[in-house]
Structures are given as C-alpha cells and as structure tokens.
Image (spheres, rainbow, N blue to C red):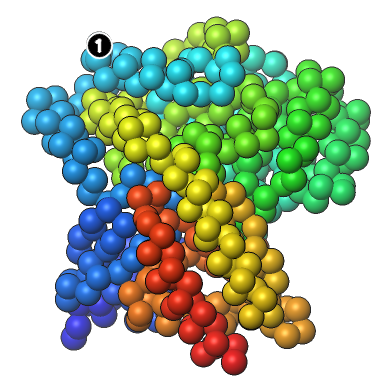
Amino acid sequence: MDKSQEIVDLRKEYLMPCLGFFYKNPPVFERGEMQYLYDVDGKKYLDFFAGVSVMNCGHSNPFILERVINQLSKLQHLTQVYLTSPIVELAEKLSKVLPGDIHNSFFCMSGSEANEGAMLLARIFTGKKKFIALESSLHGRTNLTMAATNIPMWRADPFLPEDILFISHDPEKVLTELEEVLKNNNDIAAFISEPIQGNGGIITPPDWYFKEISKLLKKYNVLFICDEVQTGFARSGSMFAIEEYDVVPDILTMSKALGNGIPIAAFSTTKEIAASFTSPSASTLGGNPVSCTSALAVLDYIKQNNLADKAKKLGGYLREKLENLKEKHPTIKEVRGKGLMLGAELVETDGQPAFEKLDQVLEQLKDRGIILGKNGLHRNVLAFQPPLVINQEDIDFLIEELDLALGNVFG
C-alpha cells in the first residue's frame, strides 16, 4: 500500500466523514519552502493556493520561523488574564495598519471565532439582534456565522437561527434590496460582508459598491462588519481589501494570513465601539505569545518586502495572462479578483458550470507539479491565491501548464 492510500484510509477510519480532500490520487505533503511544497517522495510542487490564502509570506519562511522558535523556547503559553508583551505589541502594531480609526483588537484562534465575536460586539453596541448578509457569503462554521453563510454546502446545521436577512450581491440589485430591508426592520445590528467573496467564487464588486452601501448603513445607523479573513494582509494589493474600495468599516475581522500558518485571529474596531464591550470575555489560546510573535513577524515581513505592491504588480501580470488564456479557451467564462486573489470561472459549451472537468484540470496540474484551488457555488471557479512570495517565472510556468491542461480536458 502506498503512503497516499494509507493516509486516506486512516482519515476515513479516525476523522469525521465531513472532511473531504482534493484529488483522486492525492500526494502526501511532507514539507514546504516559501512558494513550494514537497511530497513524501520528494516531488516539488508550486503552491498556488497557499492553504486558502494563509501562507502569504510563504511556507516555513526563515524570517518568521526564527522569531517563532525563539519565542517557543522562552514562553509558549499563558492565557490572556496574565500579562505578556507580544499581545499588546501586536495590538499596537495592528492599530497602525488597520484602516481609518479602527484601533482596538480582541484576539482569538479562527476566522469563525473572529466573525462570531464581531457579531456579538455589534449586538452589544447597538442593542439590536439581526444582521444583513450577502448571497454567496461564507463567514464561518459556528452557529451564528454559519447562519450568516449563504453557500449551501457550508450550512450543515439544520437548526440555524433566523437572525440573518440575505440580500443579492448583484451590483444592480444590492442597493435596492439593502434599503428595502433597512426600511422595514428596526432591529438590524450590522451588515456583514467579505470585500471579495472567496468561497463564493472570487466575486469582486465594482469600485463604487461599498461606498454606496456604507452611505445607506450610516443613514439607518447600522454597523458594517468587514470580513477580511481570506482577503487580508496584502493579498489584494492593499493591506486589507476594503482599502481598495476607499471605505472604513466599523468592525474588521482577520485570521488566516495573520499567523502565516500559526493559528490566530482577531476582530478590531473603533475606540467608541470597543468601549461597549465590558462584560468579561477571554480566549484561552487567543493571543498567546507564540501566535502573536508569528503575527508580529508577518507584519514586519510584509512591510520590509513590500508584499502589497508585489501582489498588485504580479496580480496584474497574472490577470493579463489569464485574460489571454480566456481568448484561447472559451471554457473560461470570466476572470475576476484583485491582486493575487483571482478566479477563473469555467463553463461547458452550453454555459453550464464545468465542475467535473475543473477537477480533471486540477488533477493534471497536480501531476505537473502545481497546486491550485477551486471555489464557487458550483465549485467551477479556479482559485489563484498563491503565497505572495512567488515570482514572474512561477506565473509563466503556471500559465503554460494550465494552457495544456485546459486543452487536454476541454479539447
């Protein structure tokens, strides 16, 4: 029995059956090095998914590892009721890169927990209960964040609370539907949205979108929670994707790339809103010294290596190459996204989602040494979300192999 089949069998035996995996013949990854992964047989892969926008600074980045290992050797954990330095250093450093007047942070362990905390904070501050969310959204797997998720495959709980009102993400409908909901409901605490819907299929709003939404929210005294769990930390070409829209939300959530593989998350807000959160609360593992040290190193590495500018430049190059492929391969219906968060929607000749053939494309790319993601309501969107440390040669290699794979699968 090969190692891959052994791991598959052990997963089936000991893990929950809800946990799936990519590929019919999946490799077993053993180590990573910046934008590359290596399997147990020593085969090298270009990682173009980054663990779903987590490894923005690259796998086992020496700059980050050195600081994390040093912290591990000194102090690994104390919960938030004790005084340690890294958590306050991180909160201070974040306040300097967060948009506008967002200033205070609460640290936890996952994006779901961050969004749940942000929604709790909105209820506390406003004294209101309900929320507005967009179609195709994904905000987490806790009870309230799952209720705010509109992708059917991620709504596992059959008894979700009915406190979320969904509106279309379509730019032609969103403002009309939003105002209709705001007019007819006086119990709305907040509107929650991703700047770019990742799992929804890299759904990317036009430039005016969040400015006009924010105007309506302010008119009706409703908060704006911006979910930057997947979009944050230089991926879009700005530190946070909402900055691409020249808007400052009331509460911003983050996770994934903040720790570069070390679990950490946070929700951050203004001094005024933060001041309302006085009931006792803590996260046992949230903001521990190791996680915060990793996050501090991430922020330093992003700044020192101009990763936001790099993502904007290389993202533009990748998009141009994908648009060229679109001219050659009619199966690519649309290319969308910002920076190094791009998606290419694949369809059949009759316009139906080409999810089965997309899986064949992913399988061929894997065999050629490229790891690529997929998302979308129909799982027919190729997701390009690599570590931000890639180079132009990596993009050229990806495009060359993707061109071949598309030709092989679609003809």
The quadrant of the rendering that contains the N terminus is: bottom left
In the picture provided, is 21 more to the left or to the right than 327? left
What kind of residue is marked 1? Answer: Leu
Q: Nearer the viewer, residue 396 or 285?
A: 396
Evaluate whether residue 158 shows in this view: no
Q: Position of residue 279 (x, y in %)?
A: 50, 11
Left or right, 349 with reference to 26: right
Q: Position of residue 204 (x, y in %)?
A: 67, 50
For the question of whether residue 203 can be seen, the reply is yes
- Name the secondary structure under disc 1: loop
From the top left corner, tell me how far across and down residue 70 is, in percent. 12, 31
Q: Residue at x 17, y 73 (%)?
A: 42
- Decide if residue 181 is on the left or right side of residue 87: right
| Relative to 360, residue 67 above or below | above
Q: Residue at x 73, y 35 (%)?
A: 210
The residue at 37%/76% (across/down) is 366
Residue, disc 1: 83
Quadrant position of residue 219: top right
